[in-house]
């Protein structure tokens, strides 16, 4: 299985009727600000450097962000906070990100998500996340990252589940890091959602420290 074949499989997925209906309705109705744009309206695959040592795992596409642009964290406020940080840390060649054709190149990083379809209220169900989990498992098997950065508690708990670990032992707190038995590091960060960034729960400085720590961890594992 290659990333290209896996991504093609992801794009064609229709396992979750609720999500299929929602993502396609959003793509059809559109937001007024994007009424002249063609929405992606399908599951959103991962993207980035196929030889990445850092894998970033988010929650799920935003209805008018990734569900519109077809690329993870592209086209919404979360991406507007994420990609400048990745640019400052040297993982991205540019800070401004708008579409799949904007010239963005990730260096030593691959970005994916726990869920691949935009969910109503940004809340995929446990069953829907379980349906998506094999895709994330295969991405990890193909890429074999040294560090997995979990953006938010749900992404962290999904990585624990994949590794058959209990969240009673491994706690999600911003900046926490754990080395698993397979020597892979898991690094926790608050999700760069507006709910966190506009309230000051996640600041620019806090986020920059996450990517510095990710860089330090991969350099320790050369």
Image (cartoon, rainbow, N blue to C red):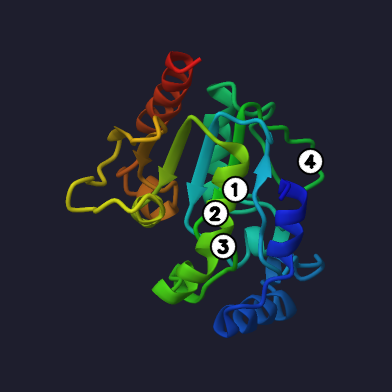
The reply to whether the C-beta atoms of the residues labelled 2 and 1 are less than 8 Å apart is yes
Mark 1 / mark 4, whichever is N-terminal = 4
Look at the numbered disc 3 and give the secondary structure of its residue.
loop
Choose between 194 and 221: the one closer to the eye. 221
Name the residue beneath numbered marker 3. Answer: 62
Mark 2 / mark 3, whichever is N-terminal = 3
Mark 3 / mark 1, whichever is N-terminal = 3
The residue mark sitting in front, 3 or 1, is 1
Query: Crowdedness of circle 1 by 10 Å Cα count: few (<14), some, many (20+)?
Result: many
- Spatial separation of the CA atoms under disc 1 and disc 4: 24 Å
- Spatial separation of the CA atoms under disc 4 and disc 2: 25 Å
Mark 4 / mark 2, whichever is N-terminal = 4
Which label was assigned to residue 175? none
| Res 218 visible | yes
Name the residue beneath numbered marker 2. Answer: 136
Name the residue beneath numbered marker 4. Answer: 102
């Amino acid at each position: 299985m290659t990333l290209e074949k896996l991504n093609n499989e992801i794009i064609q997925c229709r396992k979750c009727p609720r999500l299929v209906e929602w993502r396609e309705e959003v793509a059809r109705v559109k937001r007024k600000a994007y009424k002249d744009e063609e929405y992606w309206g399908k599951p959103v695959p991962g993207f980035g450097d196929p030889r990445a040592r850092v894998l970033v795992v988010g929650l799920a596409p935003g209805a008018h962000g990734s569900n519109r642009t077809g690329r993870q964290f592209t086209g919404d406020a979360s991406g507007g906070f994420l990609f400048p940080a990745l640019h400052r840390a040297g993982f991205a060649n540019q800070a401004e990100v708008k579409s799949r054709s904007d010239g963005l190149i990730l260096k030593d990083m691959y970005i994916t998500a726990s869920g691949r379809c935009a969910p109503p209220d940004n809340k995929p169900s446990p069953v829907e996340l379980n349906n998506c989990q094999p895709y994330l498992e295969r991405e990890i098997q193909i890429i074999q990252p040294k560090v997995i950065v979990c953006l938010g508690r749900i992404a962290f708990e999904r990585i624990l589940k994949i590794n058959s670990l209990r969240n009673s032992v491994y706690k999600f707190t911003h900046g926490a890091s754990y080395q698993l038995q397979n020597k892979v590091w898991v690094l926790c960060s608050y999700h760069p959602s507006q709910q966190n960034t506009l309230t000051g729960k996640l600041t620019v400085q806090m986020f920059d420290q996450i990517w510095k720590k990710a860089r330090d961890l991969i350099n320790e594992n050369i």
